[in-house]
Image: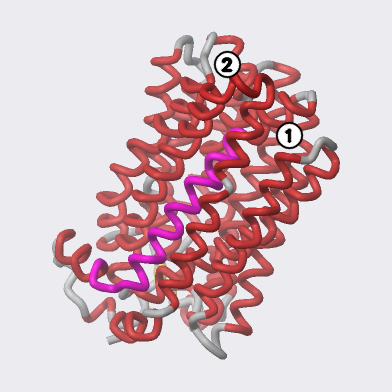
Amino acid sequence: MSTFDARAGVKGGGAAPAYYGLALLSTVSLLNYLDRMVIAVLVEPIKRNLGLSDTEVGLVAGFAFALLYALAGLPLARIADRSSRVKLVSICLVVWSAMTALTGMARSFVELFVARMAVGIGEAGCVPASHSLIGDMFPPHRRAFAVGVFQAGGLVGMSFGLAGAGWVAEAYGWRAALLVAGAAGLPVALLLYMTMPEPARSGQASARPTSESAMATMAALARRPALVHLVIALSIGAFATYGMSQWISAFFIRSHALGLAAVGLYGGLAGGGGGIIGAIVGGLAMARLRPRDARWELWLPAAGYGLAAPLFAATFLLPEALAAFLLQFAATFVASAGGAVALSAIQTFAEPHRRATAIAIMLMLSSLIGLGVGPTAVGVLSDALSPATGGDSLRYALVISTAFLLWASTHFLLAARHARADAAAADQ
């Protein structure tokens, strides 16, 4: 497999290989988020078919996936920092696609739980390796845009892909939807492995030893307050966003009496459209703002998450479905604009040979707190509120979860206070 430097191209062939690679990785991101979140649109039929409670659904949708996703992320990131990232992403895509299809064969809560754990193992290797690849394919001032495109691919999978899954589920059942979602990844894995070259590692990575221990790497990263606050912000934000995204389809079904296909379509347009546009707009904004002051990588996420909190709360409180979808679009737009920029900012505070590990640490914490606890907490809170609020218990559980976006916003601002010193340390 050949290598390239995106700024010089393959053997001087220009930047086209970088954008081809970004297109492939964005497709992988689409499948990553589709297979991760497909359970969200299938919550109600799975719950009825298998006789699950909201707490059990929350465990399957969140904790089951997040447990091994978090635990496997760091070892796979260490592999990405030392060997072929393209090969790693290809193998991981095959694994999680096969396990998503297997989830469609589950006959009990235990089988569903175990299958979702296996999906988490495969998906754990995708984002750290992909972000590391993007970091070597694009210069710093274009990195947020590239990460935004990568995130937009995921949002296509999480929204319009879910719309397709909802249609398949309504026509052929939830098991068929999972089988189709899983099968879609196999040809993409082959295309990625066969056609995408491995980028040369940028900066001083080639001059640094690759034998640094995991403990030494984590200790070095932990001494950077900007990175620590950034990871905390993303983890707390993930608690709110994953909790909301796993339950929002069920909310519209319960509170607005919509069908699976309608929720998939309108939810895809609102959440997906807002997220995709927001991620790309955030990246384009950083291409202009970062050269003026690199701290915009943290100020913009602080503003985005802070504004998203009241918009999401209003989404769950409004009685009209159309108005709720419009506010969901606005809330997702500002949150995604900030989120894509925040993800790219991690690479500012980590050397090239530590990037995948830094991203994996963030994913480990955000997965345990966000994916693992977020959906489960919303489910538990919904069950707890049910005696007092009846059919509106899920509505109020989701409203409460939006407060965590404000908490995350404060940590982005704290990270900005240390940004210049820590970015300089990563450049040495």
Q: Nearer the viewer, residue 299 or 206?
A: 299
Count numbered badges in the picture. Answer: 2
Query: Marks 2/1: CA distance?
Result: 17 Å
Taking the image as drawn, is residue 378 in sight?
yes
Q: Is residue 427 above or below residue 245?
A: below
Does the magenta run of residues contain 211? no
Q: Are marks 2 and 1 in contact (CB under 8 Å)?
A: no
Q: Find numbered disc 1 in the image and state the secondary structure of the residue it sits on.
A: helix
Q: Nearer the viewer, residue 147 or 253?
A: 253
Query: Where's the N terminus, which quadrant?
Result: bottom left
Q: Residue at x 20, y 77 (%)?
A: 208
Q: Nearer the viewer, residue 403 or 53?
A: 403
Q: Mark 2 sits on what residue? A: 47
Name which quarter of the figure residue 395 lies in. Answer: top right
Does the magenta run of residues contain 225? yes
Q: Mark 1 sits on what residue? A: 264
Which residues make up the magenta segment? 222-247
Q: Taking 204 as reference, is 368 left or right?
A: right
Q: Position of residue 206 (x, y in %)?
A: 26, 78
Q: Nearer the viewer, residue 118 or 190?
A: 118
Query: Where's the C terminus, which quadrant?
Result: bottom left
Few, some or many residues within 10 Å of mark 2 (<14, 14–19, 20+): some
Q: Is residue 223 above or below residue 60?
A: below
Q: Taking 379 as reference, is 328 left or right?
A: right
Q: Residue at x 52, y 28 (%)?
A: 379
Q: Taking 408 as reference, is 333 left or right?
A: right
Few, some or many residues within 10 Å of mark 1 (<14, 14–19, 20+): many
Q: Amino acid at mark 1?
A: Gly
Q: Amino acid at mark 2?
A: Lys
Q: Nearer the viewer, mark 2 or mark 1?
A: 2
Q: Position of residue 232 (x, y in %)?
A: 39, 59
Q: Residue at x 74, y 27 (%)?
A: 255
